[in-house]
Amino acid sequence: MRTVRHALSLAAVVCLLGTAFVRAQSKPGAKGADPVKRGQSLYAAHCVSCHGQTGEGDGPAATSLKVPPSNLTRITQRYQGFPRAKMADFISGEKYAVGHGSREMPVWGKKFSATGANAAAEIEALTRYLESLQRK
């Protein structure tokens, strides 16, 4: 039990440090900016610590997680096409993803939930960025 708590604490610290680092180096996307670029910024702030810079599931916190992060570059291969609506549901917490925690509390809290500020635009931007990561 202590090892699990330690691993979760380590993952939380890595996530917080990664988010702080990204926020310190990135400027918020301007209104009307390219949604893929905005999605890349959101990905860096909220996803990279587990899914890695390239989306392959090899982020710095990945080894301390109970469930390995998905390789986000192979979504199209898994679904025979990119399922935008399904990915948006995973991001928002509408669909259950084991590694993201419960539907009520995904790892990023309410950032991408229906109650989050600008949630729809940010979910769309992050979904488009994930689509841009797909391997041919």
Image (cartoon, rainbow, N blue to C red):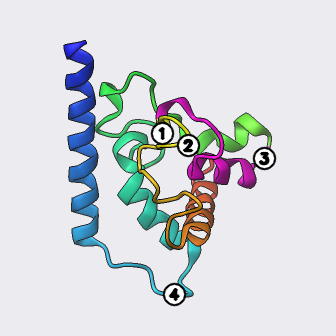
In 3D space, how far apart are the residues under numbered discs 1 and 2 (Cα atoms)?
6 Å
Report the residue marked by disc 4: 31
Disc 4 marks a residue whose amino acid type is: Lys
The residue drawn where x is 39% and y is 44% is: 52
- 1 and 2 marks in contact (CB < 8 Å): yes
Disc 1 marks a residue whose amino acid type is: Glu
Report the residue marked by disc 3: 81
In 3D space, how far apart are the residues under numbered discs 2 and 4 (Cα atoms)?
27 Å
Report the residue marked by disc 2: 72
- Neighbour class for label 2 at 10 Å: few (<14), some, many (≥20)? some
In 3D space, how far apart are the residues under numbered discs 1 and 3 (Cα atoms)?
18 Å
In 3D space, how far apart are the residues under numbered discs 3 and 2 (Cα atoms)?
13 Å
In reply to whether residue 60 is colored magenta, the answer given is no
Bounds of the magenta span? Answer: 81-99
In 3D space, how far apart are the residues under numbered discs 1 and 4 (Cα atoms)?
29 Å
SS class of the residue under badge 1?
loop
Q: Nearer the viewer, residue 117 or 70?
A: 117
Disc 3 marks a residue whose amino acid type is: Gly
Report the residue marked by disc 1: 56
